[in-house]
Amino acid sequence: MQFYAESLTQYKRLKTREVKIGILLLGNFHPIRIQTMTTKDTMDTMATVEESIRCIEAGSELVRITAPSKREAENLLNIKNELRKRGYMTPLVADIHYTPNAAEIAARIVEKVRINPGNYVDKKKFELIEYTDADYAEEIDRIRERFTPLVTICKEYGTAMRIGTNHGSLSDRIMSRYGDTPMGMVESAMEFLRIARSEAYHNIVLSMKSSNPLVMVQAYRLLVKTMFDEFGECYPLHLGVTEAGDGEDGRIKSAVGTGTLLEDGLGDTIRVSLTEDPELEIPVCKDLVKRYDSRQSAVSSRQSAVGSQQSMPDIGKLPYDPFSYQRRETFTVDNMGGKHVPVVIADFSKIDKITPQHLQGIGYRYDEVTDKWNIGDAAADYIFCNQVLDFALPGTLKVLSYYNTWLLAPDKEKYFPILDGDQYLNGAGSISSTINFVMIDCYSSGYDQQPLEKLFARLKEDKTAVICLSSTNTNALQSIRRMFVELMTYEIKNSVILICDSHHATTDESLIHYAVEAGGLLLDGFCDGVCFGHHFGNAEVITDNKWLNTIAFGILQATRTRISKTEYISCPSCGRTLFDLQLTTAKIRAVTNHLKGVKIAIMGCIVNGPGEMADADFGYVGSGPGKITLYKGKEVMKRNVNSEVAVEELINLIKESEAWLET
């Protein structure tokens, strides 16, 4: 395999081994399966059964249940028997972390076990230990001795297994050799996979989860390449952004990470980890998966892509590294490109008469008493419209308009033209001396390379030109990514704005659409700005520019390309959770949501505690019933704080660390 996917220019599913999980077949071009995880105490049989049924009836094809000890693992039998008695045959998955004995019990009961190679045998004490090659080999032998019994049981009982790496729970041994890297994540899983293969056990699914979509995407891509390089084949992949959070932010972060990989043709089953009731994860999964229903074929031996995808030139060599982030090199035009964060352009083109009140939705509030504009952290940088406004704009806001409208604008320092290729090359007489936005529809029907090369030649010499890329193709992300490859091959360093319109009927589907298409390009280091619009048939159904603006800044935040608010790394509840995660997350958000750029992790228990908080500034972790441990980075600052005062103590910790701002 040349890259990490079957194709980078069209959607094409990656062929993976077929895995049997009870009555369910996974991989090998079977439909992308949807799953979730229960939140009730596993020892509460009936509560877990009822919650499982709600998830199944919502559409979950696999249900995962935590089994942190032998007691919970043994009780899986009662849960399974009750579900089967009620006619529910959906496969169950036991979630195992620190207890191999629990995994061996569960593997005799349920259809699949999930182990975390970072803590199944190894320990994580945040210790840096130097290993010689001989020491390292000895540790692998120790893993083999402890892991092989589970493999033997799975083979005997026909039980499937997920080897699920978590970015934040890499063992000290892996960290010592590979560091906190995607390669460390891959090698953590590969060690276990090699042992399983040596025992002729192949009923395996793998995952590379992280709360950071960028790390997650790079790790999955690297895993696929590593498996093909070493084995010549790929095992099925379970996709998910762990600890995504709740609400729009959680959905955006999940869609950015999972959707980027689905666009690559990777992924055989997905979960969206939200800090909400588990059945609420299922509609988000469905919206993600159905994007590809019209693009993937029925199950067959090799064919995996059908539909109205536009063909385009193959990629001979990638001019960027898909396994490590580096932003595409550009020169600066005003506040775009270079070292500037990506800009946000608000689409006002469907508003008949724009007034100052419309600007409130995109971060600008006019105060009549002081005759001044108040500008928020998530304020759009430009608006796109086709009218000359009859009021003075805030000092930082500028306008894009079509060429003929731009000619009428008296203030050429505030208004800039949008030109199609013909206007830019031939038709327009006078253009702006500072910024000109040039539109390119990527590889649409009738694509012709020759005019494109002529356009490239002029763009390359024009320090005022900003390129606007869009695509009406079904494979729009691949089309725009292919155009970026072309720009980089021709060494064109103009800034690029992504124009992304949604034609979906609901806001939920549109959110997924923007997050996948823009997020995937931003994670590859592309795009110096975004502009989102919404059209459904001939009608404009989204006129809420505030919502579109929020989504745009949310995607930039999720891709870590522009930070405009507090970030919450919040795990979904499970049977291990030691407090009400949803309520606590809401309380913490209410008092900290003004801390721009601060990352706060809210973890239900120690399993998803200090490890998954590796990327956070502060952590709030359940350490026992009614007890919370507070972290600064990876360091414990306050142990076993009473939950009644823990939020207040978290605020005090942030203040002591000089990260607090008064509202």
Image (cartoon, rainbow, N blue to C red):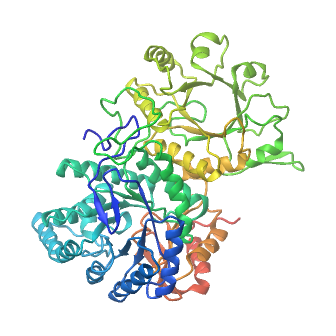
| For residue 62, above or below residue 652 | above
Q: Say which quadrant the N terminus sits in.
A: top left
The percent coordinates of residue 187 (x first, y second) are 24, 59
For this rendering, which residue is in front, 446 or 339? Answer: 446
Q: Is residue 255 above or below residue 6?
A: below
Q: Percent from the top left, x then y, of residue 423?
A: 62, 15
Which residue: 47% across, 77% down?
574
Residue 144: quadrant of the picture: bottom left
**Is any atom of residue 560 visible in this view?**
no
Q: Is residue 41 visible?
A: yes
Measured from the top left, where is residue 618 in percent x and y?
51, 70
Residue at position x 34%, y 38% in the image: 7
For the view shown, which residue lies furthest in the left direction? 134
- The residue lying toward the viewer, choosing from 601 and 253, is 253
Foreground: 415 or 248?
248
Residue 57 higher or lower than 234, as above or below: below
Reply above or below: 207 against 78.
above
The answer to whether 290 appears left or right of 206 in the picture is: right
Tell me if 322 is positioned left or right of 403 in this view: left
Q: Quadrant of residue 344?
A: top right
Along the viewing direction, whichever of 531 and 430 lies nearer the viewer: 531
Q: Is residue 472 left or right of residue 94?
A: right
Q: Quadrant of the C terminus?
A: bottom right
The structure residue drawn at horizontal position 78% and vertical position 20%, both measured from the top left corner, is 408
Q: Position of residue 46 (x, y in %)?
A: 50, 86
- Give the number of marks: 0
Residue shown at the point (68%, 50%) measured from the top left: 547
